[in-house]
Every structure is written in structure tokens, then in C-alpha cells.
Image (spheres, grey):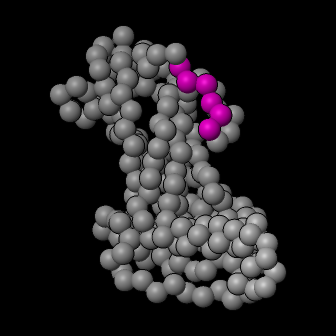
């Protein structure tokens, strides 16, 4: 801490917050994905700004938007002023007896951003199966962080003049067979 920071707590606090944020980003890159706030929506505008269906009750073949927020994703620096994130989604639908009813792979989500992202959301257009019976169901969404798989994972310091590799053991990332994954679940009814 320099003399100016010592005299001005707001400068000191801002520096500490930046350092905590940098450390949290490094820890997040080595953690499993956190998939949150799954919602069946009529409309999605942006992160945290969406309109859910009044009830999670649908019909066969119905089109719905599946919204999910993702944390602990990996953003890889691809140019001096660009970060890239690559997430692959898939889902499975199970009936009330836990029988698999349907499964689909979702489109790859590849994003480039000038700054290191602090928020990330996905919106998928899905159609309920044609032959789904009336009853209660559970949709399990799985997201894979393609940039965060064990083979690609090399967290680096994000700020400052030097880019330094962060040392970590190969087993420090939560993964399945070298893949960085996260899951979320949402229930619904078909009438």
C-alpha cells in the first residue's frame, strides 16, 4: 500500500476489491460450473431480465425458452483485448418415475468479450416432445465449459502488466473425465 492509498481509504478499498475479484476469478476457473436460476420463459431480454411463464404447465410440442445463469466459467484470453468463453449445453427430461423421456444436445454458445465477463446467461429455445404424456417431469440441464476442460485449463492472472500462469494440481478442477461440468434442474407439468 502506498502513502496515497493509506491516506485515502476509498483508494485502498478499491484496490482490495480488485484483488479479491481477481482471486475469485482464478478460483472460479478451477471450480465446477454453477448453473442457477433455471426458468421456463416467454421472453428473455438480458441477464436477470426475463418473463417466466405464469405456471410451469405445458403441452406436447410447445415451444419454451429455457433460461439459465452460469457462474465459474472459464474465459480464455485470445488476443490482447479479448476473452473467449465456450459453453455446450444438453438436457434430459425424466418422468415422475425417473424414466428418461427425451434428451437433446443444445447449440454451442461461443462468446467473445472485450472484458473478462462477470455474468453469463444462456437462453435455449426448446420444444417439448411430440409424444409426451400428461404428468410431472424434471428437466436436467448439463452445461460443459469447453474452455475449462482439464486439457485446456491454465488459469492466468488477468490484471497487471505481467500474465503469469497460476500453478495448480491437475485434480483441482471439479470435472468428470477431464470435463468441466455444471447441472441444474427444473420441474414442470404436461397437461
Left/right of residue 8 with respect to residue 65 in the rendered view: right
> Residue 155 location, x and y as percent?
53, 78
Which residue range is magenta in the image?
Answer: 48-53
**Count of picture labels:** 0
> Residue 23 location, x and y as percent?
55, 73
> Residue 152 location, x and y as percent?
48, 76
> Is residue 55 highlighted in magenta?
no
Mostly what secondary structure, the magenta segment?
A: strand
Q: Residue furthest right?
A: 4
Q: Nearer the viewer, residue 37 or 61?
A: 37
Q: Residue at x 81, y 81 (%)?
A: 4
Query: With respect to residue 45, does 56 lie above or below?
Result: above
Q: Nearer the viewer, residue 130 or 45?
A: 45
Q: Residue at x 76, y 86 (%)?
A: 2
Q: Residue at x 52, y 41 (%)?
A: 68
Work out which quarter of the rendered image holds the C terminus and state it: top left
Left/right of residue 23 with respect to residue 97 in the rendered view: right
Query: With respect to residue 122, does 146 lie above or below?
Result: below
Q: Residue at x 43, y 25 (%)?
A: 128
The reply to whether residue 54 is visible in this rendering is yes
Left/right of residue 54 with respect to residue 189 in the rendered view: right
Amino acid at each position: 500500500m502506498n502513502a496515497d492509498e493509506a491516506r485515502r481509504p476509498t483508494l485502498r478499498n478499491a484496490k482490495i476489491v480488485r484483488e479479491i475479484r481477481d482471486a475469485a476469478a482464478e478460483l472460479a476457473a478451477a471450480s465446477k460450473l454453477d448453473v442457477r436460476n433455471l426458468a421456463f420463459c416467454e421472453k428473455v431480454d438480458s441477464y436477470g431480465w426475463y418473463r417466466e411463464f405464469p405456471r410451469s404447465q405445458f403441452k406436447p410440442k410447445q415451444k419454451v425458452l429455457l433460461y439459465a445463469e452460469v457462474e465459474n466459467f472459464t474465459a480464455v484470453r485470445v488476443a490482447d483485448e479479448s476473452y473467449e468463453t465456450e459453453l455446450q449445453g444438453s438436457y434430459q427430461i425424466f418422468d415422475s418415475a425417473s424414466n428418461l423421456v427425451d434428451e437433446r444436445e443444445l447449440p454451442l454458445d461461443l462468446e467473445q468479450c472485450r472484458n473478462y465477463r462477470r455474468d453469463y446467461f444462456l437462453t435455449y429455445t426448446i420444444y417439448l416432445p411430440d409424444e409426451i404424456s400428461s404428468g410431472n417431469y424434471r428437466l436436467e440441464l448439463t452445461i460443459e465449459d469447453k474452455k475449462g476442460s482439464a486439457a485446456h485449463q491454465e488459469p492466468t492472472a488477468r490484471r497487471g502488466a505481467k500474465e503469469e500462469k497460476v500453478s495448480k494440481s491437475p485434480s483441482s478442477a471439479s470435472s468428470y473425465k477431464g470435463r468441466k461440468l455444471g447441472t441444474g434442474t427444473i420441474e414442470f407439468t404436461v397437461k
